[in-house]
Amino acid sequence: MAPALSPSKTRTRVLRRALSTGALALGICAALAAPAVANPIAPDPAHSPNAEDIRVAYWVTLIVAAALAVVFLGALFVALRRFRERRGASPRRVTGGTGITLRVAGALGLVAVALFVVGVLTTESARKLEPSGPDGLTAATARHAQVGVKDVPQPEPGSDEPAEGAPLVINAVGQQWMWRFEYPGEREDIAEVFSYNELVVPVDTAVLLNVRTVDVLHRWFVPALGGQVDAVPGTTTQTWFKADEVGRYPGASTMYSGTGFPAMRIWVRVVEPEEYEQYIEQRANDLTEAQGAVEEQNREAEE
């Protein structure tokens, strides 16, 4: 007959079994849930050249940081094993002169300089506006960028015609708590074509956004199409993107702007060029009809 275990050993065994069972259950749940959730480390897939530049900078920085962490932790582990105190023997002592300090500082300085250079190069690349592709919208507008984006085609001096290769320029106006998008194009029966919260653009087309606000600070951010851009009162800030795939891309204002801030969402719907032109035409007709209904209502009220 096996000897009875002491109460402390019994508790230890029960605790070990409980921890083992819990770890196994947690592992099973993680394995089953993994396909259903996004990678918490990787950023959203890029669907615009400038977003791809940002993604490259992110991965370079993450890899360098991980490599430094491995080196530091490895050195710490080696030091703990080599210089630990042993029974019957004093721990070994180590001293470092100015030479080792300078070598470590120099290596870290080189890493910092390399990261700085990568950051400058990717920033410059992200700011450079690329022309629309062969499958994009060929129409342009005479309204152009102000600041923040490089290599924007400009019209000939004294000409009202848009420059060849000019991007599609759209105003993105933030207000508590929505976004208003003003599309280019002129019609005699309506001042402008606009939409709220959902921006519709053609695929493979360079889109230039004039980001503004009519009240407080807001921030434009659609992760798949580029970086974050502040909308500052009294200032027009610029960003651009060229979506490479038809779809609907979510975003949000990441600047707190009041109690309705969580509802200030953004959707960019990318469609074929023909569908974009149909959307603009239909939107203009709907706004014209709505404007006529309001005018009719006002006339009836006056009578």
Image: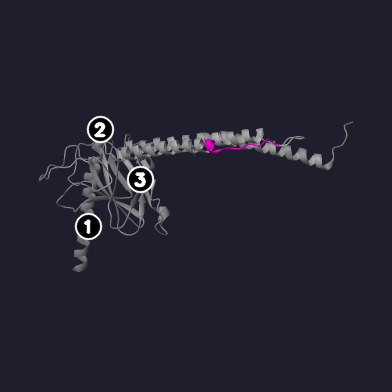
Question: Which of label 1 and label 2 is nearer to you?
Answer: 2
Magenta span includes 99? yes
For label 1, the crowd category at 10 Å Cα-Cα, with few meaning under 14, some 14 to 19 and many 20 or more, is few
State the count of labels.
Answer: 3
Label for residue 128?
none
**Front residue of this view, candidates 232 and 174:** 232
Residue 9 image offset from top left, x and y in percent: 81, 39
Q: Disc 3 marks which amino acid?
A: Trp
Q: Which residue is mark 2?
A: 133
Three-letter code, disc 1: Ala
Q: Is disc 3 placed on a helix, strand or loop?
A: strand
From where the camera sits, is residue 295 visible?
Answer: yes
- Tag 1 secondary structure: helix
Residue that label 1 marks: 293
Q: Nearer the viewer, residue 116 or 129?
A: 116
User: Which residues, given as a range, are shown in magenta?
Assistant: 91-100
Depth check, mark 1 against mark 3: the one in front is 3
The residue that mark 3 highlights is 267
User: Residue 59 falls in which quadrant of the image?
Assistant: top left
Residue pictured at 81% horizontal, 42% vertical:
8
Residue 187: x, y in percent?
A: 16, 49
- Amino acid type for the residue under numbered disc 2: Gly
Q: Residue 38, can we see it? A: no
Nearer to us: label 3 or label 2: 2
Mark-to-mark CA distance, 1 and 3: 28 Å
For label 2, count other residues whose C-alpha is less than 10 Å away and answer few (under 14), some (14-19) or many (20+).
some
Q: Is residue 176 above or below residue 145?
A: below
